[in-house]
Amino acid sequence: MPAYDRNNIFARILRGELPCKKVYEDAFALAFHDIHPQAPVHVLVIPKGEYISQADFCAQAPAELLVGFWRAVAKVAHDIGLEAEGYRITANHGPNGGQLVMHFHVHIIGGRQMSHRMGNMARNGEPRGERGGEQQ
């Protein structure tokens, strides 16, 4: 993974340099609506700190940030009304995992029935993107 880029879009949102449609914020996390939603409800949750990926976050973040971040994710899902019907939490890791912004973040996706298939993953022997399915 590359070094953390302090000018990535999520770092700039955290610093208040770029706007977002905020859903929640506390000392550990910021949650906001995705600008390219893949479902009726699509919220991103980012930790406060310079973490590239889930692996980086788990290895480097202090315990109180790890706990506070995941509690924030659960609170956001509850507060936006997704608990009763269910939702999906996704975190992409690196280029092959579909990570576009190199700041660790999770997607909370819901508001509709999801397929059991994960995103647009191809089956064995099938070119990527040939089958349908929701994007992540």
Image (cartoon, rainbow, N blue to C red):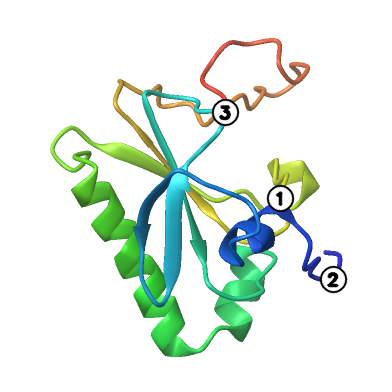
Instruction: Using the numbered discs, state the Cα–Cα distance from disc 3 to disc 1 in whole angstroms.
Output: 13 Å
**Drawn side of residue 33 relative to residue 82, left or right:** right
Q: Quadrant of the N terminus?
A: bottom right
Query: Residue, x 44% and y 67% (percent of image)?
Result: 29
SS for callout 2: loop
Q: How many marks?
A: 3
Provide the residue designation for mark 3: 36
Q: Work out whether 96 lies above or below 50.
A: above
Provide the residue designation for mark 2: 3
SS for callout 1: loop
Picture coordinates of residue 99, whole percent (x, y): 70, 46
Amino acid type, callout 3: His
Query: Residue, x 63% and y 27% (percent of image)?
Result: 121
Toward the left, the furthest residue is 84
Provide the residue designation for mark 1: 101
Q: Work out whether 57 lies above or below 118.
A: below
